[in-house]
Amino acid sequence: METILVLDFGGQYNQLIARRVRECNVYCEVKPYTISLAEIKALAPKGIIFTGGPNSVYEDDSPRYEAGIFELGIPILGICYGSQLMAYSLGGEVSTAPVSEYGHTQMTVTKADPLFTEVATETIVWMSHTDYIAKVPAGFAVTAETATCPVAAMSYEEKGFYATQFHPEVMHTTEGMKMLSNFVYRICGCAGDWKMSSFVERTIKELQEKIGTGKVLCALSGGVDSSVAAVLLSKAIGKQLTCVFVDHGLLRKNEGDEVEEVFGKNGHYELNFIRVNVRDRYYAKLKGVTEPEEKRKIIGEEFIRVFEEEAKKIGAVDFLVQGTIYPDVIESGLGKSAVIKSHHNVGGLPKVVEFKEIIEPLRMLFKDEVRKAGLELGIPEHLVFRQPFPGPGLGIRIIGEVTEEKVHIVQEADAIYREEIAKAGIDTELGQYFAALTNMRSVGVMGDFRTYDYAIALRAVNTSDFMTADAAKLPWEVLHKVTNRIVNEVKGVNRVLYDCTGKPPGTIEFE
């Protein structure tokens, strides 16, 4: 199988690079930069990509790779820190830039080379650096520049070495996919015959080998990620799998019954299904708690404790499976990324978990890739394209303290919002949309009476990878109808707001 290998030097976008390569129908995986030269040779990649990273390559403790990697005869693309590493390792000079660059930057291609085939001479790229290549190594030619960066790109065509100071993997680089495609096809010579079905087949085989005859518990929420993880396990080990659905009382309207209908005894999947109703237990734990991270961690710990209790009832369970996906990992700050928020199934896990191992088969995939995997597994489209729902549920769509009354309010408002979005025929156009309950109360008037009630915030975003997102420009007539229905039908609400914030600076969820 053709493989492009991504060596991770601590960049936040390492898996995004891999995902972009997979979009070119070429298999790609990320390995730590500490992987040995022998292991790289054994993998026999068609190409290697060095990621970005937070370090300065000239510092003594910065991550580096042995020079022998440049003698393998394998094309290499260095991105940001990776470009500086390439320059530094091969005799060039890297130093602190006189002017740092961050964000959208106009770049000029100054010399044609395979990486920039069919790329415009003037193009927009995404920069994020404080160091720069002050002098290129022998044999290299400068191929692009910006107003403040003299080496925005360089190449040594005969050796197959290419470097970009900018990030071609992010959507903000307007022709980035064209550049990565050029690297994969023109420079590395890949055929592009890999498909998501290959991931599914490989993952099922790996799960069978890892689990053997062991017993497995799967954390099933009924959302896209956990549903795909559950069906993957069902295909791999059948009745060795028990799916535990924790109904914590923080679900969308009627969702508990819907999940049981799909995966319960009358469902279509070979697995054992248990529904655990622990609403009162969660409400008691969350009473008086207002800080978002504390709420997430409480919900996450209770989540695991419920699983441990169910495991003891079943007896001798070896593995816990969760539907963690890559944006969850990044936002939880694992590795070298900053903590944005703890996901209950990643950074929110307690330190002691009574299972041999936690298995996360979707950990390196993005949401749209998970959906492709779901279709490959034969999961119905209405489940695969269901609205994403966070593990902590409505607990993080309620600003401040979580109470049963507030849960009911946001459930009803959210159901109205989703219903009207679907009626308008725009549900499939949006990446995610939902209603949240703010902690703001304001004066209103209904009939001849004064009210002092809550404000509902509506959220809708367009995104493909959930790493970045733009606020959706919903039709005013839809917002108007949703607002009228919520204010008239949901007791305790007298005002509706629309969130126009993108990600960044906001996150998709409210807490």
Image (cartoon, helix red, strand yellow):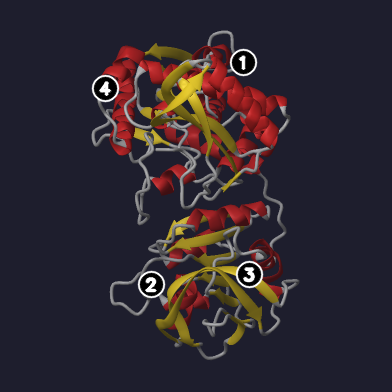
Label located before the other in sequence (1 or 4)? 1
Q: Secondary structure at mark 4?
A: loop
Is 448 on the left or on the right of 21, as rendered? left
Label located before the other in sequence (4 or 2)? 2
Question: Of the residues tagged 2 and 3, which is closer to the observer?
Answer: 3
Residue at 28% x, 72% y: name it. Answer: 61
Question: Mark 4: few, some, or many residues within 10 Å (few <14, many ≥20)?
Answer: few
Residue at 71% x, 52% y: name it. Answer: 193
Residue 324 screen position, x and y as percent: 45, 37
Label located before the other in sequence (4 or 3)? 3
Residue 409 drawn above or below residue 472:
above
Tell me how far mark 2 sits from mark 1, CA to CA. 50 Å
Residue occupied by mark 2:
64
Q: Is residue 420 visible?
A: yes
**Which residue is farthest top?**
266
Residue occupied by mark 4:
287
Residue 15 screen position, x and y as percent: 50, 53
Residue occupied by mark 1:
268
Label located before the other in sequence (2 or 3)? 2
Residue at 54% x, 70% y: name it. Answer: 166
Label located before the other in sequence (2 or 1)? 2
Tell me how far mark 1 sits from mark 4, CA to CA. 38 Å
Residue 303 screen position, x and y as percent: 34, 25
Q: Quadrant of residue 93?
A: bottom left
